[in-house]
Amino acid sequence: MRSFQLLPVLFLVAPFAAHADDVAPAAPPAAEPSPTATEVVAPMAPAIDVASDRAFLGLLGADRQRGDEGSSFSEDWWTKSRPVIEIHGYLRQRTEMFTNFTLGRIDPPGASPWLWSQPVDNSYSDANGQDHAVNLCGTADSNGQYARCNRSSQLGANMRLRLEPEIHISDNLRIRTQVDLLDNVVFGSTPDAYALAPATATTSATGNRYAPVAIFSNTQTAPTAGVNALRNSLDVKRAWAEYATPVGLLRFGRMPFHWGLGMVYNAGDRFDSDWQTTVDRIALSTSIAPFDLHLGLSYDVISSGATNATAASLAGGQPTITTPGTMVNQLGAFVVRRKPTQVTGLALARGEVVFNVGALATYRTQEIDYPVGTTPITSAASATTTANAGLERRNAWMVTPDLWMQFLWRKLRIEAELAANLGSIGSPPSATSTTPALTVRQFGFVSETDFRAVDDKLRLGFGFGFASGDPWVESLQPANGWDTRLDGGSSSMSTFRFHPDYRVDLIFFRHLLTRVEGAYFFRPSVDYDFLRQANGQKLGGGLAVVWSRASEFIQTPAHNRDLGVELDLQLTYQAKDGAWNDRLDRQGGFHAALQYGAFFPLGGLGYLPNDDNGSARASVAALSTSTAQTLRLLLGVSF
């Protein structure tokens, strides 16, 4: 009898399985056994034995009939029967004071773009002997003259609310997003005194007449791009879908990309992060459980080039790419051998060695391009009178192999990442017929070692990183986005740059250079939890020393490899409330940190003998550098 009863069930279920974008769901989970029920046969239609069929198929139940014997609902298939929304994220506030971030250097404005700029309201005499005075401070003298303003410190605060909603449609299908609200908004930066009225034919944009100067301001207004800020108060950073198919996990959309230690590709999802790697991608990954292997392929659109989107298209319509030859496409593949977390914990408890390793490779190309510094032409009509439609040959390709390794034994962790950028730019920007193709040969390496003791309260660490430099470039940072080469492009581009969210210190690599590039560093550190409770509450402190040197001496201002030594201290507190209580690897609830950093510049950040440019100064010896300091207070809530 059961075999005949299956037919109407399958015919009734089939339309529902083919619904929802014509994607059939995976096999339903096995149902709990039910008591045997008496079979009832209807005279006009095949009857359904509810109890036995529910046990046999796990599809239908007496409590799910709802007046229709043939209906099948998602509750019958999935443990998450309706779309469930989970929201994670954090709220952070950072109060920071930067003191003497110019390192005491008095370069003329624009002369040293990769060092910290002088505060606008600071008075100083530059290396050329020219005085930059701001005489507006203090109390006026008998002649009505005010004193010079001396601003060596800059104090400010900023905040961010990050929301990461996840929409779970079923057990194997979900949509994930990331939205930032008031992202890095500087406190006090949008007062109503700066609010602008819409311009009309007879009235130009103006300020708030009830707050003609900032001292009359009564409230902060929402950041609005083009009105009182460069960006809006809400930014949608990412949105992508994940579907667990029978052959692997399919992901598509705008999503984070993280690999290894984050030296090259870094998702930037930490509480104190400011930078991200986000890609427009479609990817498929799968696992071979018996061998702890994970494999994946991906296709990314790094840059689409110009589109035909205009202000009028905001009302609707689909923009298209106008110059497909300028697209930068990327193919990626990875393979990782990594033990599951539970197995790793058990192996370490037994005193066994755990070794994880992975390899990633990406390959990207670009055929043609717009000249650097020009406005893209977005229609064929406007390009008819322009040579080559305003385009130029680029003929560029680059492959990035990246190897990650992790060694674990008891309380010891040694982790490393090695990567390279290898490629060619057939026609560099502003190239002439005599300019040779530029080869790209950049190498980077980073390692982290830490050892835990005293019930994991004590953590001893050592970090080392290396980014290759370029002996034919005079600066660690390009002045206009492109390296000015001394050799005319006859040798390879060699300056490797870490991802800016790979954080090493509080001052030099974080703010002055904005990343590790063309340099190497040594970083010993020690951290200790003075107070730790079972509920996750803890109070701790840490100390780190960072010694940095340039990979190529010519890239430093004074042509000396030694860049500086930085001392970083911090005091941290965490009251781990909420959903992350049971996750030791996640920062949850309320947390705070007080951090202090002091950077002592060495010879490489000094001056060359001719840096005074023949000014009235006695000699360049009169020019010197001094210590930079920072004090930071971080307050946050993670959930």
Image (tube, helix red, strand yellow):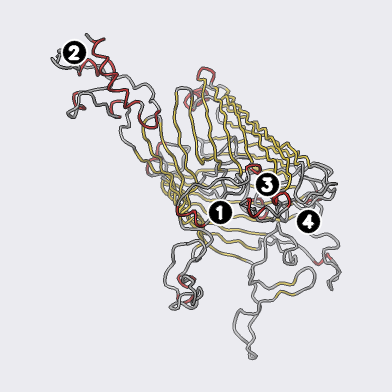
Counting the numbered discs, the total is: 4
Q: Amino acid at mark 3?
A: Val
- Asked whether, in this view, residue 321 is left or right of residue 87, the answer is right
Circle 1 is placed at which residue position? Answer: 595
The Cα–Cα distance between marks 3 and 2, rounded to whole angstroms, is 69 Å
What type is the residue that disc 1 sits on? Gln
* Relative image position of residue 451 (x, y in whole percent): 58, 34
Image quarter for residue 60?
top left
Quarter-wise, where is residue 121 in the image? bottom right
Among the two numbered marks 3 and 2 on one chain, the one whose residue lies closer to the N terminus: 2
* Disc 1/disc 2 C-alpha distance (Å): 68 Å
Q: Nearer the viewer, mark 3 or mark 2?
A: 2
Q: Of helix, strand and loop, which one carries label 4?
A: loop
Q: Quadrant of residue 423?
A: top right
Q: Earlier in the sequence, mark 3 or mark 1?
A: 3
Q: Secondary structure at mark 2?
A: loop
Q: Is residue 151 above or below residue 255?
A: below
The crowding category of the residue bearing disc 1, from other C-alpha atoms within 10 Å (few below 14, some 14 to 19, many at least 20), is many
Q: In the rendered image, is residue 564 in sight?
A: no
**Badge 3: residue crowd in 10 Å (few <14, some 14–19, many ≥20):** many
Mark 4 against mark 1, which lies toward the viewer? 4
Which amino acid type is shown beneath numbered disc 4?
Pro
The disc placed on residue 36 is: 2
Q: Nearer the viewer, residue 107 or 365?
A: 365
The Cα–Cα distance between marks 2 and 4, rounded to whole angstroms, is 86 Å
Residue in view at x 78 percent, y 42 percent: 438
Which residue is the extreme one toward the left?
43
The residue identified by callout 4 is 557
Q: Position of residue 557 (x, y in %)?
A: 78, 56
Q: Give the labeled residue for mark 3.
A: 516
Q: Give how far across and how far down residue 610 sits, in percent.
A: 85, 63
